[in-house]
């Protein structure tokens, strides 16, 4: 199925991606952001926060926005 994926990490980008039917938000996150923790991101589907076990649907818009932004040390 086809989703609109908006990645707000760093410079950010948006693109359509194809994923398997029945994929959960947690599975999608782990596929797109290997080695990162979901707790460090605000994950929204169709502009609404959702739980990790939310099953994605055809045409959904999924947004991953970091909640912890690292900067230079003073």
Image (spheres, grey):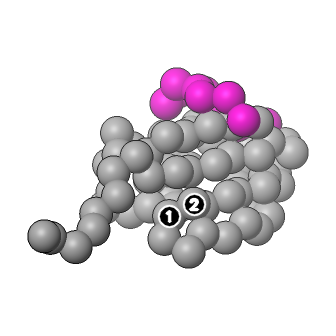
Residue 6 versus residue 52 in the image, above or below: below
Residues at discs 1 and 2 in contact (Cβ within 8 Å): yes
Residue 65 appears left or right of 35: right
Give the camera-side residue of 41 and 52.
Answer: 41
Compared to 5, does 62 lie above or below?
A: above
Residue 22 in which image quadrant: top right
The residue lying at 50 percent from left, 64 percent from top is 9
Q: Say which residue label 1 marks.
A: 9
Instruction: Reply above or below: 70 against 65.
Output: below
Give how far apart the Cα atoms at labels 1 and 2 are.
4 Å
Point out the image quarter for the C terminus: bottom left
Where's residue 23, x and y in %?
63, 41
Task: Please name the residue that numbered disc 2 is placed on.
Answer: 8
Which disc is residue 34 wearing? none
User: Residue 60: horizontal and vertical position, in percent?
Assistant: 80, 42
Q: Residue at x 40, y 46 (%)?
A: 67
Query: Which residue is at the far front?
Result: 74
Magenta part of the chain: 47-57
| Mark 2 surroundings within 10 Å by alpha-carbon count, few (fewer than 14), some (14 through 19), many (20 or more) | some
What is the residue that sits farthest to the right in this orientation?
59
Q: Is residue 61 left or right of residue 68?
A: right
Magenta portion: prevailing SS class: loop
Q: Nearer the viewer, residue 40 or 60?
A: 40
SS assignment at label 1: loop
Q: Position of residue 18 (x, y in %)?
A: 75, 61
């Amino acid at each position: 199925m086809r989703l609109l994926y908006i990645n707000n990490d760093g410079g950010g980008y948006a693109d359509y991606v194809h994923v398997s039917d029945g994929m959960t938000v947690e599975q999608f996150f782990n596929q797109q952001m290997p080695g990162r923790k979901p707790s460090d991101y605000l994950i929204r589907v169709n502009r609404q926060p959702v739980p990790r076990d939310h099953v994605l649907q055809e045409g959904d818009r999924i947004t991953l926005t970091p909640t912890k932004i690292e900067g230079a040390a003073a």
